Image (cartoon, helix red, strand yellow):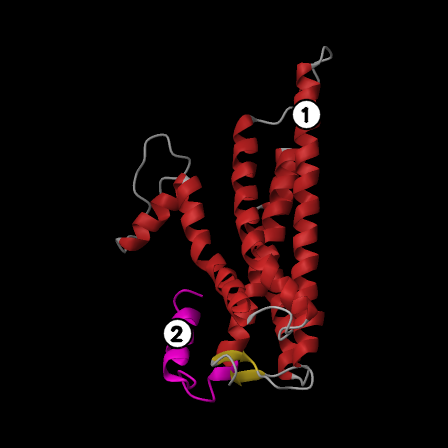
Amino acid sequence: MTGLQYPTRVAAMITGAPPLGDAVCPILGALTFFSIYVSFFSVILIALSRYVRITKSIDTYKKIFGPSRSFLWVSLSWVVSGLLVAPGFLGYGKFGWNTRNRTCGQVYPHPYHSHYFSNIFGVSCWVTLSLAIGIFLKVYFDVKNSVIGTNSSDHQHDHYVPRRLIKQTKHMFIFFCALAMCITPYALLNSIDLYVHFLPNAVRIMLLVLFGLNHVVNPFLYAWKLTIFQRAFRALSRCKRRLPIQPRAAVNR
């Protein structure tokens, strides 16, 4: 999003024309929605990973979220995201140059423009957010019961959750909350109708900017809360293939 979508979007808004030509504009519009859907499903996978790691044994977690299985989960999220984008190329909406917003996205006016936003984009957003909230609530209650169990007289150590895992899950929940606060208002507006007139134009633009900030804020949140991301970003900025060595770090490669 930062490397491709935003520069071309800014260029389109400044020039008032498709940044890479009419032929590429539908692809840019589709990629924008594709990346949003991938973000939605990434939230679900993060929440599900935290739930399995905390509530199940380490062996069960490795079976479900080992390297090869994790690759399959991510690949599945990309496949589903592609299926959600496909209707825009099959007549249920249309990807291309949007003269009203001067961006590459869903073409307006189009007979099924609002249907795509409401029935595909809006529904996808609400389903994924609701699932993520449900999973995180389940994690919370399981951790709460674990604390109660370990503090009680029967000492149910089988349900004990390490403090490190709780801390990691809190960080993941913070990232989810940041994403939800950024995208929910705009998604709600799109679920009703993208061009409803009960909101001033300035408010709609503000919600759109807030929606776009999600992709900018997320990397900084990860780097703020997770040391491994700080080291990874430092390596990327220095064009290094290996992470900087850090004493007692879980990963030094």
Which residue bears the numbered disc 1? Answer: 146
Q: Residue at x 68, y 40 (%)?
A: 137
Disc with the residue nearer the chain's start (1 vs 2): 2
Q: In which quadrant of the rendered image does the C terminus lie?
A: top left
Range of residues picked out in magenta: 1-26
Does 102 appear above or below 247?
Answer: below
Q: Secondary structure at mark 1?
A: helix
For the N terminus, the quadrant is bottom left
- Determine which quarter of the picture holds residue 72: bottom right
When the figure is inspected, residue 6 is found, relative to residue 22, above or below; the finding is above
| Residue beneath disc 2 | 10
Image coordinates for residue 172, horizontal then vertical, percent:
54, 43
The quadrant holding residue 16 is bottom left
Q: Residue 199: x, y in percent?
A: 60, 68
Q: Quadrant of residue 158?
A: top right
The answer to which of 159 and 3 lies nearer the viewer is 3
Answer left or right for 133 relative to 2.
right
